[in-house]
Image (cartoon, rainbow, N blue to C red):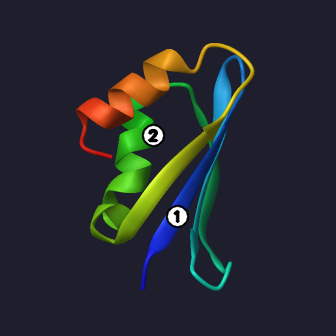
Amino acid sequence: MSKYSGIDLHANNCVVVVSDEEDRICCERRVPNDLTRIIALLEPFRAELAGVAVESTFNWYWLVDGLRAAGF
């Protein structure tokens, strides 16, 4: 079953959610804006993740670039 991630990016932290095809939440956490910590949170779901969406009005480049470089 595919999973999807949404990340709500704020100035110094973000909320990362992973849900399945039936909208059940598999993971929901607020973490500091630290690429290593965000990737570690997503890593257990990597094989099943169909996509990651980032919501942000500014300052999203570092996160998107980092996730892409990590293969997400």
Q: Residues within 10 Å of mark 1 (few under 14, many from 20)?
A: many
Quarter of the image for residue 64 reads top left
The residue sitting at 45% across, 56% down in the picture is 51
The mark total stands at: 2
Contact between labelled residues 2 and 1, with CB atoms less than 8 Å apart:
no
The amino acid at mark 2 is Ile
- 53 and 37: which is toward the camera: 53
The residue sitting at 68% across, 78% down in the picture is 23
- 20 and 35: which is toward the camera: 20
Q: Nearer the viewer, mark 1 or mark 2?
A: 1
Left or right of residue 70, residue 42 in this image? right
Q: Can you say whether 68 is above or below 42 in the image?
A: above
Picture coordinates of residue 18, whole percent (x, y): 56, 63
Picture coordinates of residue 24, whole percent (x, y): 66, 80
- Identify the residue under disc 1: 4
Left or right of residue 27, residue 11 in this image? right
Secondary-structure class at tag 1: strand
- Identify the residue under disc 2: 38
Quarter of the image for residue 22 reads bottom right
Secondary-structure class at tag 2: helix
Left or right of residue 34, residue 71 in this image? left
The amino acid at mark 1 is Tyr
Disc 1 to disc 2, how far (Cα)?
A: 14 Å
The residue sitting at 66% across, 19% down in the picture is 12
Q: Can you say whether 42 is above or below 55 in the image?
A: below
Q: Can you say whether 18 is above or below 63 in the image?
A: below
Q: Earlier in the sequence, mark 1 or mark 2?
A: 1
